[in-house]
Image: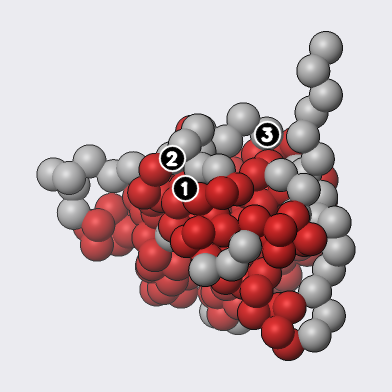
Amino acid sequence: MAKKPARTPRKKPMQARALRTVDALLDATAQLLVTEGYAKTSTNKVAERAGTSIGTLYEYFPSREALVTAVIERLAERLVARTLEALDQAIADPHEDQVRRWLATMVEALEREARLVRVIETQVPFTWEIPMLRELQRRLEAIAAARGQAIARITGRAYSPETVFLMTTIAKATVLQIATDRPRELDREVLIDEFARLFADQFLR
């Protein structure tokens, strides 16, 4: 049985120059994933695109898989931070207009990374094996439950764990679909408005 390529970095950059090198390597990996796809992305191509040597690349990353894992983790951290910021804004005043603003913010954040997200979802075979993503998923579920309780105090409605799960799952799936896989004939703003209305009618009134 073939040994799986290592997916963890060899070392973490500490100095400013090393940080810039790693950022350049991750930027190059993300660009290649989008333009050439996962199968055709290689460490040699990444090093060339980043303007560094293959030896320097291997100082930090032992394999293509380790580079791709780091790209996914960096993207996830950015999206989770934006999600929590937008979610807190919506919870401060949990009504249809706030839901609409939250949806628009999240759709815009994902649209900026739509091509990369599609590659990660459809081509990278180990995405959901990455420990950090599983941990982020658990964190988001716990945060969603706490936010659901906060909304309940404001609206006077009690939300079961099952309801919170449905709320977050439906919202997450809808945002992802609108941002990355929306049929061209469907209007983005109409979709956001319609979902905000449906979500508010079902969960906030």
Locate residue 54, reporting x and y percent: 64, 56
Residue 96 lies in quadrant: bottom left
Q: Is residue 48 visible?
A: yes
Residue 15 lies in quadrant: bottom right
Query: Disc 3 designates what residue?
Result: 126
Classify mark 2: helix, strand or loop: loop
The reply to whether callout 2 and callout 3 are in contact (CB within 8 Å) is no
Locate residue 9, reporting x and y percent: 81, 55
Report the residue at 83% width, 24% height from top. Answer: 3
User: What's under tag 1, amino acid-wise?
Assistant: Leu
Report the residue at 66% width, 52% height from top. Answer: 67
User: What's under tag 3, amino acid-wise?
Assistant: Phe
Q: Nearer the viewer, residue 163 or 186?
A: 186
In the image, farthest residue toward the left: 185
Q: Nearer the viewer, residue 61 or 115?
A: 61
Q: Is residue 136 left or right of residue 184?
A: right
In the image, farthest residue toward the top: 1
Q: Nearer the viewer, residue 199 or 130?
A: 130
- Is residue 154 placed above or below 61 in the rendered structure? below
Locate residue 117, reporting x and y percent: 48, 49
Report the residue at 81% width, 40% height from top. Answer: 6
The disc, 2 or 3, on the residue closer to the chain's N-terminal end is: 2
Q: CA distance from mark 1 to mark 2?
A: 4 Å
The number of numbered badges drawn on the structure is: 3
Q: Nearer the viewer, residue 92 or 186?
A: 186
The reply to whether callout 1 and callout 2 are in contact (CB within 8 Å) is yes
- Is residue 48 placed above or below 125 in the rendered structure? below
Query: Disc 2 designates what residue?
Result: 37
Query: Disc 1 designates what residue?
Result: 33
